[in-house]
């Protein structure tokens, strides 16, 4: 299969937290950039001679809106060649080589089972896209639980927006949980205790979407299967 690369232009940059930045990218050669919520793009960055060592993939954080522009949210990783380049070298007006949309981490055709969106860090990106898409298109859906794990309150991405979405999207539950924050009145600890607690009383049909660091995803898979769910109920997108 031939790889089709496009030139994207960075149109806007916003620092979302102390170590994450939002990148808006427009593809001038396309009238509209069509993708399914949950898909990703791959960037080809000038950081290595070998092309496979130049590639960095990021979930699209925005929902498809019929335009040729989309958003990525990227964390600055210590010692990470890709994110260091993006944070230090990319300005409004910079060009980025990219391909996509790619990936099969997308919503089922019919939303009949409860949805558990379980994420850490920038793993919230595809779930933000999915939740807004469901709201905008009035897609019939059961309960949606967005369980978002971070260390500190300052690490929470799109917090005000997710609170607003709870008011606008029936059955949408935004549950941030912090593992190292002392002055926090919300949920504390890791993501796993939250979905286990929700399903403890009654094991309901559910789809589990996991996005984030490998350690979280590995543990979640084991725990969800241990609760009696089929591995086909689990969908995942690995970061890092």
Image (spheres, helix red, strand yellow):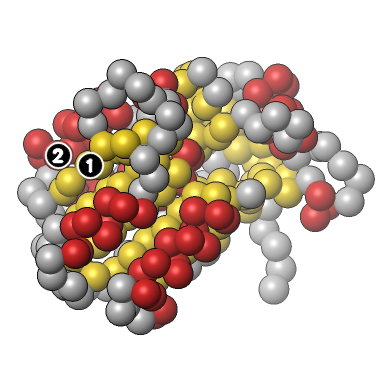
In percent of width and height, residue 186 lies at 23, 31
Q: Quadrant of residue 160?
A: top left
Q: Is residue 172 above or below residue 95?
A: below
**In front: mark 2 or mark 1?**
1
Tags 2 and 1 touching, CB below 8 Å? yes
> Residue at horizontal 55%, vertical 23%?
19
In percent of width and height, residue 40 lies at 52, 53
In percent of width and height, residue 115 lies at 24, 62
Quarter in which the N terminus is drawn? bottom right
Q: Is residue 240 above or below residue 152?
A: below
The residue furthest right is 49
> Residue at horizontal 57%, vertical 32%?
75
> Residue at horizontal 27%, vertical 57%?
195
In this rendered view, identify the residue nearer to me: 197 or 209: 197
In this rendered view, identify the residue nearer to me: 24 or 238: 238
- Asked whether residue 40 is in view, the answer is no
Q: Mark 2: which secondary structure?
A: helix
Q: Mark 1: which secondary structure?
A: strand
Label 1 packing within 10 angstroms: few (<14), some (14-19), many (20+) = some
Mark linked to residue 166:
2
Q: Where is mark 1, residue-wise?
A: 174
């Amino acid at each position: 299969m031939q790889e089709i690369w496009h030139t994207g232009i960075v149109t806007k940059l916003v620092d979302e937290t102390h170590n994450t930045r939002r990148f808006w990218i427009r593809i001038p050669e396309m009238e509209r950039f069509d993708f399914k919520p949950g898909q990703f793009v791959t960037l080809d960055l000038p950081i290595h001679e070998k092309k496979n060592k130049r590639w960095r993939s990021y979930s699209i954080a925005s929902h498809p809106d019929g335009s040729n522009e989309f958003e990525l949210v990227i964390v600055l990783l210590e010692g990470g060649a890709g994110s260091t380049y993006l944070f230090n070298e990319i300005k409004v007006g910079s060009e980025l080589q990219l391909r996509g949309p790619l990936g099969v981490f997308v919503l089922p055709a019919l939303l009949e089972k409860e949805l558990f969106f379980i994420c850490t860090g920038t793993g919230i990106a595809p779930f933000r896209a999915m939740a807004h898409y469901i709201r905008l298109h009035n897609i019939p859906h059961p309960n949606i639980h967005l369980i978002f794990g971070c260390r500190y309150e300052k690490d929470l991405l799109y917090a005000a927006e997710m609170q607003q979405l709870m008011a606008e999207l029936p059955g949408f539950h935004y549950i941030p949980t912090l593992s190292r924050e002392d002055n926090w009145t919300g949920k504390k600890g890791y993501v796993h205790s939250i979905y286990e607690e929700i399903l403890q009383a009654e094991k309901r049909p559910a789809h589990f979407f996991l996005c984030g660091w490998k350690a979280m995803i590995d543990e979640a898979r084991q725990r969800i299967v241990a609760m009696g769910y089929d591995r086909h109920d689990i969908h995942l997108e690995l970061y890092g």
